[in-house]
Amino acid sequence: MKESFWGYLIILMGILSISFIFFFQRVTATDEHNYHILKEVTEAAMFDAINIAEYRATGKIRIDREKFVENFVRRFAESASLAQTYVIKIYDVNEIPPKVSIQVGSVESTNTTGEIIDFDIINRLDAILETPY
């Protein structure tokens, strides 16, 4: 009987270990996914928002604020996971020099212990558009 309890304990610890590994792997993958989407979408939206008429007239690179926000939200919505709820905060958009500050947050939750535990995953990016002369 004593040996069977040790067997149950080892099986229970194995199941708990696998569930913790699965949960932390999911949180890490969500964080990495959000960061790469944020980085790529910000760069693409900044290039889309360049004011071509201003560049041709004066040679200065300037982005249009409204066009950047529109392109960013559209591209992010196309690439984001449908299983998550995102909160996008755009803190700063400078037109000259082209600079943006963006924060994207999502919530990851688990129910392994009987109560719901929420983790806020927040990625913040400050980007400056650099182009070769």
Image (tube, helix red, strand yellow):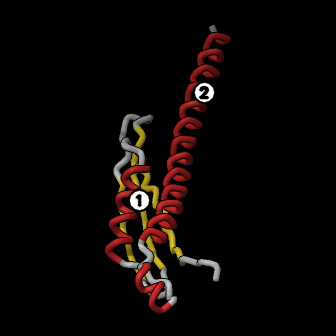
**What residue type is disc 1 on?**
Gly
Q: Which residue is label 2 attached to?
A: 13
Looking at the image, residue 123 lies above or below residue 11? below
Where is residue 104 shown, x and y percent of the image?
42, 62
Observer-nearest residue: 58 or 79? 58
Q: CA distance from mark 1 to mark 2?
A: 33 Å
Q: Which residue sits at x=45%, y=75%?
A: 101
In the rendered view, does 96 fall on the left or right side of 4? left
Earlier sequence position, callout 1 versus callout 2: 2
| Dot 2 crowding, Cα within 10 Å, few <14, some 14–19, many 20+ | few
Q: Which mark is residue 14?
A: none
Q: Quadrant of residue 15?
A: top right
Q: Which residue sits at x=44%, y=76%?
A: 50
Where is residue 37 shown, x and y percent of the image?
50, 56
In the rendered view, does 5 fall on the left or right side of 61? right
Q: Which residue is label 1 attached to?
A: 105
Q: Residue furthest front?
A: 56
**What residue type is disc 2 on?**
Met
